[in-house]
Amino acid sequence: MTWNPDNTELDELLGAYALDAVDAHEALRVEAYLRENPRARAEVEEYRAVAALLASSGTEAPEGVWERIAEALDAPPDGVSAPVIEFRRQQAGLGRDGRRPRRLGNVLGIAAMIVAALAIGFAVTEIRLDDRIGELNASQELAEEAIAAMLDPQARQIALAGPDGSVAMRLVVRAHGGGYVVSDDLPRLDAQTYQLWRIPPDDDDGGDDGDGGGSRPISLDVLGASPGISEFEVTDPAGSYAVTIEPAGGSDQPTTEPVAVSA
Amino acid sequence: MTRDDWQHASDSSLVVAIGRWHQEALAEVYRRHGGAVMALALRILRDRTMAEDIVQDVFFRLWNQPDRFDPERGQLRAFLLAQTHGRAVDMVRSETSRRAREEKAARQTAEAGYDLDLEVWDLTLAEQVRSALAGLNEGERQAIELAYFGGHTYRDVAAILGQPEGTVKSRIRLGMQRLRVSLLESGAVSS
């Protein structure tokens, strides 16, 4: 259906539709109309906001019902992994500080993922949320630091790919030490943890970020069961990087084959 | 996050956390909006048991499908109330519950003094809403109240009021526009 400014019949139904006061077949027609017509869609949303006020109350949530709800929520549904939540942000929205957000241009899509996860006003993106999203929301500073590192031309960007070649994790290592992990698409673990390792080059003495010695992997971070954004210490970034799955709490040395490695 | 953190989180942040199965986030959403959801369901259904079923269903759906809430399209409370209204209306329009509801309504009318408006509305907001409703003409107000709180289609409303369907349809739309303007002026809604 294309938008027709003279489509007065459907326009006349918008008020009733917003109040769920149309028949089922009319609702289908209106919904098709709304898909094509942003003005009509906005009009319905305005009416629903008004209707919400008609219904608003200052009463407290009823006791007893929450217990019934919580009882049914004990665990995520079987077989359901982390849901993907699509957060569409206004392209011209303002940042948390009231300023228009900076444009990142073609900076890694991962930066947009971080920004969207923290809801600071960037454009449309799709984010896969990790188990630590609550903490991430409270850690905007960390995310902003990670973004700043990504924008630093002197920082080293490292992609860690899984066996199928898809990028599972990204690292950004600052020229003067310190780095950030941004996980992209690692499945959630049960009673285990992901662990990040640096494998020094053969002629490396291990630097001062680990226990040194040849090419023994050096643990950089125990990332948890569903990694998000975290910071790690590394003063000598040389070598390759890998992620393994380890028992909860992490291991001194890798006990499994890597699930993702740097090129 | 501590309970204090949840209490200070925005609605959008809570929905994000719900997406990661944080029950505390859902509990906080329930604490904030459960009363309004219950009040609307109760007002439409006039049956506490059925209303509680709706409340449970609405929050359970938010738990399982948080992505259905799009913060760009409005506030979380409006979203939850729209869900509540739709489900309550579905229930009202089923024949069985219609009968039960009408019997209950008759009893409540007979008992008199049952003023849910005073019982459940926040007084300040209620005053603004009452003022906005008072600005409507009688036909618009009746049509909106019968449609929204009565759970009737506009065709039903037309039959109840003995008016043409087109008239009722227009009155609902015009009335909602006028309500919005009035509530904008009073600051109850933002543009």
Image (tube, coloured by chain):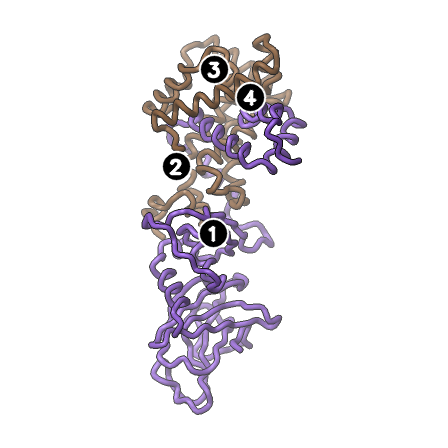
Chain colours: A purple, B brown
Q: Which residue is mark 3?
A: B141
Rounded to the nearest angstrom, the CA distance separating label 2 from label 3 is 29 Å
Residue A30, horizontal then vertical, whole percent:
62, 30
- Circle 3/circle 4 CB separation < 8 Å: no
Q: Residues within 10 Å of mark 4 (few under 14, many from 20)?
A: many
Nearer-N-terminus badge (2/3): 2
Task: Tell me, yes or no, whether dots 2 and 1 are on the same chain.
Answer: no
Chain under callout 3: B
Query: A147 or B123, which is in the foreground?
Result: A147
Q: Residues within 10 Å of mark 2 (few under 14, many from 20)?
A: some
Q: Residue at x 44, y 91 (%)?
A: A203
Rounded to the nearest angstrom, the CA distance separating label 3 from label 4 is 14 Å
Nearer-N-terminus badge (4/2): 2
Chain under callout 2: B
Task: Tell me, yes or no, whether dots 3 and 1 are on the same chain.
Answer: no
Outermost residue on the front side: it is: A5
- Circle 2/circle 3 CB separation < 8 Å: no
Vertical relation: A83 (above or below) A242: above
Q: Which mark is residue A123?
A: 1
Tag 3 secondary structure? helix
Indicate which label's residue lies in the foreground, 2 or 3.
Answer: 3
Chain under callout 4: B
User: Which three-letter amino acid code belongs to the residue tagged 3?
Assistant: Arg
Q: Which residue is mark 4?
A: B151
Q: Residue at x 40, y 11 (%)?
A: B113
Q: Residues within 10 Å of mark 3 (few under 14, many from 20)?
A: many
Q: Which residue is mark 2?
A: B32
Outermost residue on the bottom side: it is: A203
